[in-house]
Image: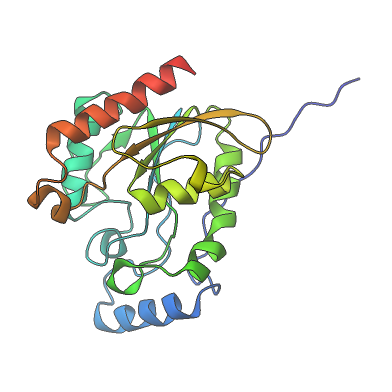
Amino acid sequence: MRQPVSTPVFENPSRDCPLCPRLNAFIAENRAAHPDWWNAPVPSFGPLDAPILILGLAPGLQGANRTGRPFTGDWAGDLLYKVLVEEGLAEGVYDRRPDDGLRLTGCRIANAVRCVPPQNKPIGQEMNACRPFLVDEIAAMTNLKTVFTLGRIAHEAILRVLGQRPAGYKFAHEAVHRVEDKTSREIFVVNSYHCSRYNTNTGRLTEDMFRQAVRAAIKAAGSA
């Protein structure tokens, strides 16, 4: 008799994950300065059975590191969650706090690095140390069709998780890449410039550009 295939189990990093000394030290500084902040690895947000994973780089210092929910409490979240609600991937009202009642219905949000880095810039060693969490998360998302990457580094991070060389899939805003993971599962990787205040203030990314990229991710998930 054929045995049923078990679904991989995913667990977020522990609150005192010891893998990255530099990030541990930075979090310790912030725990001392802001004891009421989250100041720990930020868990992913949204259902594991979602067809779309939105992947950022790392928590923002005064955003997710403060609130404990990805993209919550800063400008990037203002734009991201507004568009997700408008495009039917979330329900409720986003209010910059984790208890605002907002619910993701058609997507999940994670970061390639789960802890806040100094100057918002994780180093290669930290990317490598955190990669196994993303590997396990992707494996546990059995309905996953599309990964929507916010920025080039997140794009490269997911390609490495899927066992592909980033050089073979050039990052470009609204680009759609058809990628196979290590089990030959086909996943679309859709790119967007990061929805940061810097990118929107400089005109690199407009709200309409971001909305079109989200729609490209939804379309790719529907065609997979």
**Residue 204 drawn at (x, y percent):** 15, 46
Task: Using the rendered image of the protein, determine whether residue 1 is visible from the camera's viewpoint.
Answer: yes
For residue 62, what is the image quadrant?
bottom left
The colour scheme is rainbow
Q: Is residue 30 above or below residue 43?
A: below
Residue at image location 49% in from the left, 27% down from the top = 145
Q: Is residue 187 left or right of residue 8?
A: left
Q: Is residue 121 above or below residue 3?
A: below
**Residue 154 drawn at (x, y percent):** 40, 50
**Residue 148 drawn at (x, y percent):** 38, 37
Q: Residue furthest top?
A: 223
Residue at image location 52% in from the left, 70% down from the top = 125
For residue 118, what is the image quadrant?
bottom left
Q: Residue furthest right?
A: 1
The quadrant the N terminus occupies is: top right
Residue at image location 30% in from the left, 84% down from the top = 32
**Residue 183 drawn at (x, y percent):** 69, 34
Q: Is residue 125 left or right of residue 181?
A: left
For residue 149, what is the image quadrant?
top left
Q: Nearer the viewer, residue 216 or 112?
A: 216
Q: How many marks?
A: 0
Q: Is residue 67 above or below residue 2?
A: below
